[in-house]
Every structure is written in structure tokens, then in C-alpha cells.
Amino acid sequence: MSEWRKIRIQDYYKEAVGEEEYTYVTPEVYEILANTFRKEAHAEQMRDLRNRTAEGYTEGDTEDLLMESPESLEDMVIRQMEIETLQKAMQTLSEIQRERLHLYFFEGMTTREIADRQGTNQNAVWKSIQSGVAVLRRFF
């Protein structure tokens, strides 16, 4: 049993239900799970950074924005109004632009991954994202 690695199931499967909290996997399966977990954590961090900055990620500066501060009632109302405006603005975009923006900003996919998924070239995806963002900026 020394070859097997003990893992906590909920560390890798958040919605896991059942009686067993731990299981044993081979070292190969453990590496695959660990790599997938690291990639998902990185993608989530990048989504957070993209959502918090209008200009995108700037090493050193953007990390400071990850520090949470309490939000006032006024700030919450303003944020809600901005969300509603964004939803209206998103409706003006084409379906393909909405999908590309969602994949890029919320799913954390790269333009290459989006292009591969949609069967188009990376430059077309990038231009589509940029023009979509430009349209959205006009609403704000």
C-alpha cells in the first residue's frame, strides 16, 4: 500500500457526498488530480484579477486589489447598478461576442483555447473580445 497516496475526497471534488472522507489513489492519478487542481486554482485567480481591474493584470500592482475591504451600502448599490448596466450592454453584443467574453473573463480561458474551441483563429477571437469590451465601455 506504500505506492498508493491518501487523498481527502472533498479537496478534489467539492460536491462529493458519501460516507468516505478519504480514498487511496495511485501516484499517477494523484499527479493528474494535483495538476488539475493547480490549473483550476490558477484560472480562478486570473478570473478574479481580470474582474477586479479594468486594464488587466499588472504584476505588483494588481495583487494589492486582492485585499478585501468592507463595502458600504452606497458602494453595494452602485455596484448593483453597474451590474444591471452591464447586463443591458451585454444584450447589445452578438451571441459569439458574449460567449467569447464569458469564456475569457469568467472561465479564464486564453484566446488560443477559445479559438481552438470555436474553430477560428486566435487573432479573430482577440479582436472580437476587444471590440466587445469597447462596446461595453461606451455604456459606462
Image (spheres, rainbow, N blue to C red):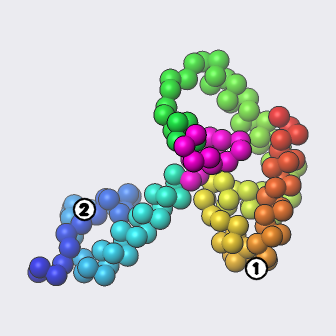
Which element type, helix, strand or loop, lies under badge 2?
strand
Residue 51, horizontal then vertical, whole percent: 63, 45
Q: Going from the N terminus, do you reach mark 1 or mark 2 first?
A: 2
Residue receiving disc 1: 119
Q: Is residue 47 depicted above or below 80 in this figure?
A: below
> What's the residue at 79%, 76% (across, down)?
121
Residue 139, horizontal then vertical, whole percent: 86, 37
Magenta residues (range): 46-61
Q: Amino acid at mark 2?
A: Arg
Quadrant (top left, top right, bottom left, bottom right) of the C terminus: top right
Q: CA distance from mark 1 to mark 2?
A: 38 Å
Tell whether position 53 is magenta.
yes
Q: Amino acid at mark 1?
A: Gly
Residue 118 placement, left or right of 41: right
Residue receiving disc 2: 8
- Asked which quadrant contains residue 89, the reply is top right
- Asked which quadrant contains residue 111, the reply is bottom right
Residue 67, horizontal then vertical, whole percent: 48, 34
Residue 9 placement, left or right of 103: left
- Asked which quadrant contains residue 30, the reply is bottom left
Residue 102, horizontal then vertical, whole percent: 69, 56
Q: Is residue 117 depicted above or below 20 in this figure?
A: below
> What's the residue at 58%, 41% (across, down)?
62
